[in-house]
Image (cartoon, grey):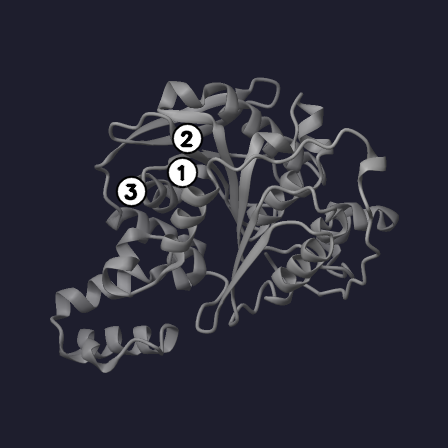
Amino acid sequence: MRENARARYHVALHFPHIPPFFQKVSLVRKLIILLSLALLAGCSSLSVVNGLTPSTGYNLAINLPFDPATGLTADVYTPDGARNAPVVVFFYGGRWSEGDKQEYKLVGQALASRGIVAVIPNYRKYPQVRFPAFVEDGAKAVKWARNNAAAYGGNPEQLFVMGHSAGAHIAAMLALNEAYLKKVGGSRTWLRGMIGLAGPYNFLPITAPDLRDMFGPPEQFEQSQPVFFADGRNPPLLLLHGENDEVVAAANSRSLAKAVAAQGGSVETIFYPKLSHANILGAVSTVVNRVVSSDVLEHISNFVQEKRNFQLPSIQTPSDIQAVPLEIEMVPMSSP
């Protein structure tokens, strides 16, 4: 009985929208629900959700080197029987200072379950490096994914970037500031779209000492903000955010969407009244989706299928662009 009460308490605390039927199901089911939603307790609970995540339905290739100079590697999740499948490069979060690709089996499996090849790279982190090194690492991962997609059942012409939290910042910078992909010999025409979960896209003023050091000096802070690179030439953006996010305010996604739309760019937003910073990522998991209805993964999958053949128009010179002045309201940030 004590275990029953504890399970009911934790699910009611973190997911108040779960209906009372929870009280009537078996203890085993309650514990599955509790473990599936353990991601809410913090990054360490990723291992719990990953432990419940199926290891079937896909092939996993691990520690594939994509940048010999730094020793960075990526893991690739290939759906069984995949041929010419769309490819998503997923960047995890962790305040640009922690995390590892092996902790995101739940994302790789979820994408593979929808017929998507998932590439999950590592990137260098603070304090080893500072901005823009982790974005540059992301660009190298995208180049590797494009060059090697076919070997893992993917279509290099159907490439997306996706991220959660700090990883969404990296994905957005790659989609909005073409300088990063140009540096590795590419362009934004490589990308069919960008998917952001709870991303910090407009977080000036920067006040936290570690972030000031990470993104400084102060005169360069604007260079770290995706919102300032909205120019109407971006691949389509899908921005998903929980209204209960107390780490990265949902205003970040609203601000970026407003800036992109003002320039005539393609952007979609979806806001979830009940989701927080952590559980919007948990909602991607197929394990969580078995016991708590969520359309986060559905929206991601639909976006990829709809945009996989999108072609970004090639604009050769800045003179071809009609700039629109931006009025940007700053959004302070906590800890992505």
Residue 42: x and y in percent read 44, 59
Q: What number is the disc on residue 113? A: 3
Residue 251: x and y in percent read 64, 67
Residue 101: x and y in percent read 45, 38
Indicate left or right for 204 with 157 as reference: right
Residue beneath disc 1: 102
Residue 9: x and y in percent read 30, 78
Which label's residue is closer to the chain start, 3 or 2?
2
Crowding at dot 2, Cα within 10 Å, few <14 / some 14-19 / many 20+, comes out as many
Which label's residue is closer to the chain start, 1 or 3?
1
Please name the amino acid that badge 2 sits on.
Asp
Query: Where 323 falls versus 117 (above or below)?
Result: below
Front position in the image: 236 or 224: 236
Which residue shows up at 65% across the image and 24% down it?
A: 186
The quadrant of the image that shows the C terminus is bottom right
Residue 273 shows in the view: yes
Element at badge 2?
strand
Please name the amino acid that badge 1 sits on.
Gln
The quadrant of the image that shows the N terminus is bottom left
Crowding at dot 1, Cα within 10 Å, few <14 / some 14-19 / many 20+, comes out as some
Please name the amino acid that badge 3 sits on.
Ser
Indicate left or right for 304 with 172 as reference: left
Residue beneath disc 2: 75
Q: What's the distance in space between the residues labelled 3 and 2, CA to CA? A: 16 Å
Q: Residue furthest bottom?
A: 20
Element at badge 1?
helix
Element at badge 3?
helix
Q: Residue furthest left?
A: 26
Residue 126 shows in the view: no
Query: Where 308 falls versus 65 (above or below)?
Result: below
Q: Quadrant of residue 312?
A: top right
Q: Nearer the viewer, mark 3 or mark 2?
A: 3
